[in-house]
Structures are given as C-alpha cells and as structure tokens.
Amino acid sequence: MFLLGIGIFSAATSDDVPEVKENTVLVIDISKPMMEQRVEQGLPIPGAQADDMMGLHDVIAAIDAAAKEPKIKGIYLVGANNALGFANSTELRHALLRFKQSKKFMYAYANYYEQRAYELAAVADFIYMNPAGSLDWQGFGVQLAFFKDALDKLGVAPEIFYAGQFKSATEPYRLTKMSEANRLQMTDMLQQLYSHFLQNIASSRPKADTAALRVLAHELGMQAAQDAVTAGLIDKLLYDDEVKEIIAKKTGAANIEKINFMAVKDFIEVALQAKEQPTDKIAVIYAEGEIVNGKSGDGTIGGETIRQLLRKARFDKNVKAVVLRVNSPGGSALASEVIWREVELVKKEKPLVVSMGDYAASGGYFISCGADSIFAQPGTLTGSIGVYSMLFDASKLMSQKLGITFDEVSTAPAASMGTPFRSMSAVERRFFQNGVDSTYQQFLRKVANGRGMTIAAVDSVAQGRVWSGNTAITNGLADKIGTLQDAIACAARMAKITSYSLRQWPEVESLWDKLFNEKKDQQTSMAITIQQQLGVEFATAWKHIQLLKQQAGTPQMRLPFFVMPPANGK
C-alpha cells in the first residue's frame, strides 16, 4: 500500500508536460463547465474519471498560445451546450476571434446545438451538424418560482425588510407573481441580453441578420436540421466521421484515427509551463461565488480570505497593480464591507482595476465600486444596489400543525428576537428595518464616493435594480466594456509598466492541500453529486435552501435571483 501510494502521488505530481505533435488540432468542448480558476475536485488517481473543472482564463491563455504555436494547425470546437454564463461566454468568444486572426482553421461540430452554444460555434469557419440534429431557436426566457401560498398553507410567515423598490430577492416569499418593478427590470435585462446575442450571431454569419433571426424564434421556424442550413446558420449536415475526414485532409493525416487531436486541458499545461518571469507583477485576485463571512469555501468568497489576499498584494513591493476579478451575486453585507475596506487601502498605494464576469451585483458591486476603473461585458449583470433582511415566523406551523408550543423567560422583551417560534413585535420589526435602511444609505455613500457621483444620482439608478454591463456604463456604474485581459492591460498602463508577469490568487490547491482538507472535498463532492443526480434546477433549489439558513436575520446585498446555465436553450 505504501508503494502504491508513492506511485499514485508520483503520477499525480509529475512535472511532465504533454508533447505537441506536428499538425495538432486543438479540441475545445464548450459544454464542459469552467470556473474563473481551475478546480481540482479530488485526488487525480490514474484511471479514475476526472472531475476537475478547467479555469476559463487558462483556456483563454491556451487559445492565445495556440495561435502562435506552429504545430497547432487549427481548432475543433465541439459541444451542444454552453456551460458558461453570458459575460464569460463573451470572453471565450473574443479569444476564439483572436485565434482566427492567425489564419488557422476552426471547425465546429455537434449532434445538435442549444442556441447559446451556437453563439460560440458561430465564430468557426465552418459549422457542421448531425443530419438528424436540430438547432434550438426559441428566444430567451426567465421563469421564477413563488412560495407565498405554500408558506401560508404551512403556517409560516416571512418577516421581510428591504430597501429599494427593485430589490426583488424577497418577492418569492411575499408575492405570488412578479411585481411590476421586477417585471420591468427582468424584461429590459432579458431584451438586452438577447439583442447582444443576436448581434454576435449576425456579425459571424453574413447570411443572417437580427430581424430574420427574431422572426425565426417567434415563428419556431427552426424545426428540422435542414431549416438551419436554409437560414444560413449551419454550413452542412454531416456525421462525425465525415467532419473528421475533412480535418484529416486539412492536416495531412492518413485517416481519421491518425489525426493529432489534443484536448485544450492538456495544452493548457504547455501554454502555462514556467518561463522566465519579470520582477514587476500584476496581481489578479479572483472573487467568485457568494460573499460570506470568514474564509472562502466551495463556491464562496470569504471576506477574510479576500481581505488577506488584497493585503498581501498591497505589501508586496513587486506587485505594481491589482486586478480584482469579480464574479459574484453578492451576499453578506458585513463580509462585503470587509473586502471594500481593503480595496480602499490598496487603491491608496497602487492602481486597482475591477474586471466583472457574469455578474458583479449587489455585494459583488459593493466590493467593486471603489476601484480606479471598472470593466464589464455587455452580458454582465451588475448594480442591484439594495439591501434586504429576512426571517421566518413558524409559530403557527408549530402550534397549529404540529402541536408544539413554546414559552420563555428573559431579562428584556427582545432577548429572543429573531427566533422562528414567535411573532415579532412592532419594535423589533422597526429595529430590523432601520438596520436595512442604514446599510442601504452606507451602500449609496460608498458608490457615490467611488464613482464620483452624488448620493441622489446613485439612488436614481440604485433601488436594487439590476443592469446589464452596457447600461451600467451609461449610468456611471462602470467605465468600459472589456475582458479580463483588457483590465490587466489597463492596470499595467496605470502602473506605468510594460514588462510584467501575473500573480494569480487564490492559488489552486496542491495535492497535499487536498489530502489535508477532507471537509472541503466532501462539500464539493456533495454539490457535484446533487447536480449530477438531480440536475441543475434542483441543485440550485438545494443551494437556495442552504443560503436561506446562512442569511437569516442579517443584512444581505444579493442579486434577486440565481444565475445558472440555460436548460434546453432557454
């Protein structure tokens, strides 16, 4: 067992870099989940199925490196689904467009295409699809669940406090349908995302225009595979072996089995292998997930963790600038405040630029607003400047449904304030609402100071409303449309450096970290298992229940909905 353990460890920690052969074709599966940074889910045991998730920016770096690598002849883009959100999908799309400037080929193939996967495939020189496949084309839609009637039947009364007429995170518990304010913001946001999506398709496919694409969706005009060819969205209907015959001829391979395919995951190791690093550095700090108190965990941004990383960058004399990559719907107001403070301290000593991912909303915007410059994508969901707090009164459920009653003694009337087993008094409700209102005013002041706006101007675009990246720039909440690479280049200009290397934090956990962090591994495995067994929708519901437990009674700066990859193209 000891020798076996050494063998596994040696294989897992080997420094061997995969070999790039002549006439290699880089394979990118766009259906594979990608985080901002790569995530190693467990011990990389030889022969076992790998659950690791690639890092989006590692993939982008690999694509840029492939454009310059003489042995790479082209890219084979596969996958029927797009696992990325709107903004990060745009970042990957820009990398593919840059690759095309190398004049190397790019072919895309799938048995069928979900419409947002097609947005990436549209970049390719030729798009092929299985003759029995289909191209989903029915527009974008959002469906929200409301629980008020269910809570009424159970005898559970939500105690809700919020600031901002668009702060709709609490609506599922107090309403049976969207408020008019929420319907307005959701409609506007969806239309902007859809318009940007159609513009991307039209720019890549000369025979398509946005008006015709809208008509196709309205009339469900993409019934059969041939309809996609007729519309100019698919070049040819072919089987997998026929597409590979084309690639074989393009690369000079004797047959399809002799094509030198290389997965992008393997080429990442080549692209990122150690090179001589300049002394001057730009720190890229990734803040991805829900904002929580304490340390970062699975899919969360720990206020203490990010504070320590920002402080580390502040005191490192070789770090000349900092880029904070934010991909967060928000969360704890207190943890957001902890991060905001450290952003302010960094900014006094060196440039700090924020790059927004799929979302940087509510608390995610709170930690961004003080930056020297803010970059977003058109599909970034941001703003949501508002606050809420929520508890539940389950006293009727206990007494009328279960026959359980409670009694108490205390030294003050509000000693048990926040308990779910009695109703709140008017004084206690006022206490919670005052806390929410106070936090909202602090939010407005911090945005006003960070963005050089008046509090009244911020309040006019706040009220909890969610904005797209484009509108955020118009409203003064962001500065420029751009990728993470653009944000890094901006930070370098502000720091007046031309030669630099990147220092990326938090660092990806080593094998030893995995061995001695069993609890986190168990949490990660549980989340993955739930998603695999129940699907994305039920996994999101489970996550929602966990969040309700975490945020009970504490002020929250959070996006009013979960953002997740579309199901069935919607």
Image (spheres, helix red, strand yellow):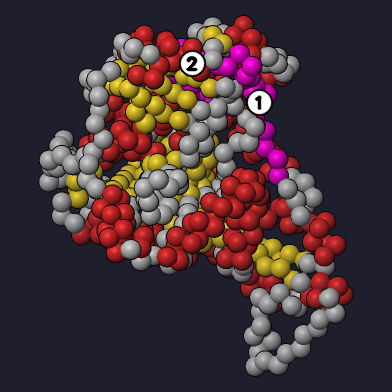
Q: Residue at x 44, y 23 (%)?
A: 77
Q: As displayed, is residue 534 above or below residue 259?
A: below
What residue did someone put label 2 on? 241
Q: Depth check: 346 or 63 in front?
A: 63
Secondary structure at badge 2 equals helix
What residue did someone put label 1 on? 139
Q: Is residue 9 left or right of residue 420?
A: left
Q: Residue at x 82, y 67 (%)?
A: 155
Q: As displayed, is residue 169 above or below residue 142?
A: below
Picture coordinates of residue 42, whole percent (x, y): 41, 54
Q: Residue at x 25, y 28 (%)?
A: 20
Neighbourhood count class around disc 2 (C-alpha, 10 Å): few under 14, some 14–19, many 20 upward: few
Q: Residue at x 42, y 10 (%)?
A: 246
Secondary structure at badge 1 equals loop
Amino acid type assigned to the residue bearing label 2 in the image: Asp
Picture coordinates of residue 349, whole percent (x, y): 22, 54
Picture coordinates of residue 402, whole percent (x, y): 84, 76
Real-space CA distance between mark 2 and mark 1, rounded to the nearest whole angstrom = 31 Å
